[in-house]
Image (tube, rainbow, N blue to C red):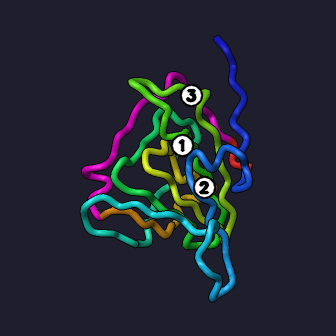
């Protein structure tokens, strides 16, 4: 049996990020719109912006999810770091190639916009539960939620 090392996290400066999403960092008030802004795309439906509270999730990832009708924006509502396992939208199934996945750390005061179709697992964090600002369609989890298994489990390290 092949042993795999836990994945180590990249930052919002990671060169793999542009294929998966947009880094969201603070800008001064009155900054003109530009490349630093998330380009949002939402299919038909009602937008939902809410504070999402979730329990701790296992650090052994066996599947990933994507949304094809809406971009998704996440940031910590508690000013704590969190992690996402990501894979580019062009990664295809019926089983996902685990070698296409990589771990991203989002620090306090930062956020992320996921491109349409970006595979993701998380958010992951080092607490019993955590709260996140989440922007998506109101029915994303009911009608735009494709999940595929990975060809092998991935163990992540929250570093």
Q: What mark, if any, has residue 58 been given in the picture? A: 1
| Tag 1 near tag 2, CB within 8 Å | no
The stretch of residues the image draws in magenta is 138-156
Quick one: label 2 or label 3, which is nearer the N terminus?
3
Disc 2: which residue:
125
Left or right of 67 in this view: 159: right
Quick one: label 1 or label 3, which is nearer the N terminus?
1
The structure residue drawn at horizontal position 32% and vertical position 62%, both measured from the top left corner, is: 137
The structure residue drawn at horizontal position 37% and vertical position 56%, both measured from the top left corner, is: 70
Instruction: State whether residue 104 is above or below residue 30.
Output: above
Disc 3: which residue:
98
Spatial separation of the CA atoms under disc 1 and disc 3: 17 Å
Residue 142: x and y in percent read 26, 52
Spatial separation of the CA atoms under disc 1 and disc 2: 10 Å
Q: What mark, if any, has residue 71 been given in the picture? A: none
Q: Classify 10 Å Cα crowding around label 3: few (below 14), some (14-19), many (20 and above).
A: some
In this rendering, the count of numbered labels is 3
Q: Classify 10 Å Cα crowding around label 2: few (below 14), some (14-19), many (20 and above).
A: many
Left or right of 25 in this view: 70: left
The structure residue drawn at horizontal position 57% and vertical position 60%, both measured from the top left corner, is: 112
């Amino acid at each position: 049996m092949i042993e795999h090392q836990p994945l180590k996290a990249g930052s919002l400066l990671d060169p793999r990020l542009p294929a998966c999403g947009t880094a969201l960092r603070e800008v001064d008030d009155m900054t003109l719109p530009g490349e630093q802004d998330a380009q949002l795309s939402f299919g038909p439906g009602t937008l939902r912006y809410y504070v999402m509270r979730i329990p701790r999730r296992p650090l052994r990832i066996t599947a990933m999810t994507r949304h094809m009708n809406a971009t998704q924006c996440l940031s910590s509502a508690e000013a704590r770091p969190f992690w996402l396992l990501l894979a580019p939208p062009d990664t295809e199934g019926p089983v996902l190639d685990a070698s296409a996945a990589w771990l991203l750390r989002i620090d306090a005061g930062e956020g992320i916009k996921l491109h349409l179709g970006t595979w993701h697992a998380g958010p992951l964090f080092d607490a019993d539960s955590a709260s996140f600002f989440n922007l998506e369609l109101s029915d994303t989890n009911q009608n735009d939620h494709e999940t595929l298994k990975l060809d092998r489990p991935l163990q992540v390290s929250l570093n």
